[in-house]
Image (cartoon, rainbow, N blue to C red):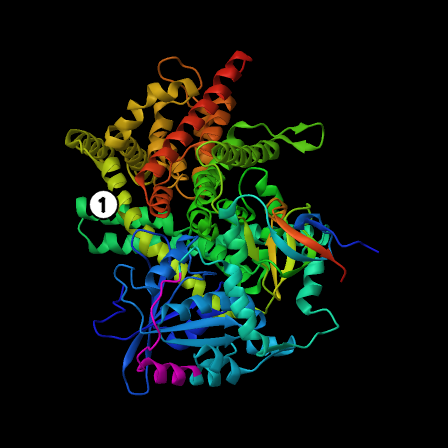
Amino acid sequence: MPEVEVVPLDRLSAGEIGIIQGYEGEEDLHHRLKELGLVAGTKVLVKRFAPLGDPMEILVRGYSLSLRKQDASKIVVKRTPA
Amino acid sequence: MKQTTAPGMKEIALVGNPNTGKTTIFNALTGLRHSTANYPGVTVEKRAGQMKLTTGETVSVLDLPGAYSLVPRSLDEEIVHKVLIGAQQGTPPPDLVVVVLDSNNLERNFYLALQVIEIGLPVVLVLNMWDMARENGVEVDLEKLESLTGAPCVPTVGMRQDNIHNLREVIEQNLTQPSLRTKRDPSDPSLDPGIRYKQIDEILEGVVRRVPRKELSVSEKLDRVLTHRVWGMLFFAGTMGLIFQSIFSWARIPMEWISHGMEHFANAAKAVLPAGPLQSLVVDGIIGGVGNVIVFLPQIFLLFFFIALFEDTGYMARAVFVLDRVMKSVGLNGKAFLPLLSSFACTVPGVLATRTIEDRNERLATILVTPLMSCSARLPIYTLLIAAFIPQIHVFHVLHLQALVLFGLYFLSIGAGLGVAALFRKTFLKGNRMPFVFELPPYRFPHFGTVAATVWDRGKEFLCRAGGIILLFSIILWFMMSYPKDPSAAARFQAERRTAATMLSGQALSEKITVIDHEEKGEKIRSSFAGRLGKAIEPAIRPLGFNWEIGIGIITSFAARELLISTLAIVHHVKTEGEGMTAGLIGALQRERSPETGKLLYTPLVAVSLMVFYVLACQCFSTFAVVKRETGSWGWLLFMIVYMTGLAWMSSFVVYQGGRLLGFE
């Protein structure tokens, strides 16, 4: 039974769901991610990682988005049971 | 290019996120009556067309580039923002904005729609891919959406006529109504996207209903294979193999048609025009010069076709997804892969394909290394020199030395390209302005009309834009190769011909005449400006093992690299033309000795040094033209020429001098 915890998005495994809590670090780069719907309170599902481990594909607001782990590590999510 | 906006004509602008089928709607509304151009000063494509209303009035329709937000982060978004607020030079503010939305994905699509609505222009919302959304279990209450947003909503399914007809009617009704909303610039960066998404959630809450579905969608099933560790990589490699096969083998057939066609055309021009400078300008300068470039059109069009097909089916995003990690290691991103691959056929489409890279520094770094990828015009040079100077022996019993050398040249090209890119990204093209994110749209069956239209638009643009500069350079190069004329030499050769005619007859005479013709040709090119330039650069290329004949070949290569071969054939008096020329030239190169030292002019070491030079040197007018246009600056072009020439010179220097130290000739 996975406990509820707060982790960077890139720490989730494929198939896991997280709810966005906020961002860490540089403000400027986050604006685009927020515009794409990755705002606080949004649920994201990690679909898969690319064959070489990076980037990762997530399902957010009904569409699939690819982002690099390095950018995903700035997004803080609450790990949530599916 | 035809004028698309007459004064007083009403303007409709189409906006939407990338991958919403916006361009399909645009094509359906305007038919084939549209033109492509660029916004002044930038490389963002401007597509404009016309639509006829039932009243007979013609209105202008503008297809704006795909954007996620009106807060500009990329060149594309900056243009959309400027056009909508009426700040784009040469484009009047629209009377009506049609926002194209993907019905499957209304939440994120609404972010842009909301910003557009906030500007205060009259808006029509198009809910495209309506059928797919229904299949996916998405239900939308259109009436409620209309009342909440105040904008009419029209569901569409791509090109389907009944929907498009309906959309035309709605556009017509709303075009006349003046806007009542207050105007506000939406690019206020202080407004947190979280606030807008809260608004969106409130609007869509009672409007969109998702029926959860148990089974996996087709797209998901495909993705399990196409982004798989093993199958995904294999599929990708197979696709690239197919592209290479088509470029290097299938494209040969139409390429031969074109070169035959150009020959016929040149002969026809010769027949019509009187012999003299004008005939020479038209036949050798214009037809010959332009022919050297348009012979690559089949390859360029094939590449554009594959790119458009990948984009339309959604596979492109998967290829980027699979390869991003590899490209990241040299400071580029997954989107740089396709431009670099395209450059193995021809640098020109490669540079054009970099447009999909949003980040300025990454795009510049990619453009600057595309000419290092060994284009197909260099292949005939490699094959000729390898056939002439690399012995047909086996290394370790199995590896063919000739094949190994060819492989090595391509390896050098890739290594140099990636290495230089990494260097640039670590130094003056450092950093990113944006996180590297992209959407993975659901797969869909390609719409061949859309693919064909895209290929045609891009091909046409290449011809119109690069064509002018290529024509200009062709004429300059023709002039350099034909002038100055030496009347005394012409008279001397004429006298030789007359002497031959009195002494010989029949077969022997025509053979002698051919010899004289070739000598005259060689003499002409040697005494031309290009020939003098070739000789003038000899001191600079001597340390690389190159003689002045190669110097002339390097100069003529600027029109197209494979011209090195015909230039060497001319300066070394190779008699036969066409098929026999290659064999004749190989023999001539192997035998040619320096008149001063009596030593062989060409040796295996010289050949390797020359091939290395051709891998790395930047010598192609078409590339110059397209790089200047895509970077928007002479400075970057100059930088590219300087760094590549420097790299090529130093590498050949190391090869030749190093080889001599090791005891090679």
Image coordinates of residue B475 in percent, x first then y, are 25, 44
Position of B62 relative to B556 (above/below): below
Q: Residue at x 66, y 66 (%)?
A: B219
Viewer-side residue, B325 vs B393: B325
- Disc 1 is placed on an element classified as helix
Q: Chain of mark 1?
A: B
Position of B378 relative to B288 (above/below): above
Position of B206 relative to B535 (above/below): below
Image coordinates of residue B581 in percent, x first then y, are 43, 38
> In the rendered view, does B598 fall on the left or right side of B529?
right
Q: How dense is the environment of label 1, judged by Cα within 10 Å: few (below 14), some, or many (20 and up)?
A: many
Image coordinates of residue B99 in percent, x first then y, are 44, 71
Q: Looking at the figure, which quarter contains the N terminus of chain B?
A: bottom left
Tally of numbered tags: 1
> In the rendered view, does B563 fall on the left or right side of B93?
right
Q: Dot 1 corresponds to which residue?
A: B280
Viewer-side residue, B338 vs B347: B338
Q: Disc 1 residue type?
A: Ser
Question: Is residue B664 shown in magenta?
Answer: no
Image coordinates of residue B505 in percent, x first then y, are 28, 38
Question: Is residue B183 shown in magenta?
Answer: yes
First to last magenta residue range: B167-186
Q: Residue at x 25, y 67 (%)?
A: B3
Q: Residue at x 27, y 82 (%)?
A: B57
Viewer-side residue, B601 vs B489: B601
Tell me, yes or no, if residue B261 can be seen here: no
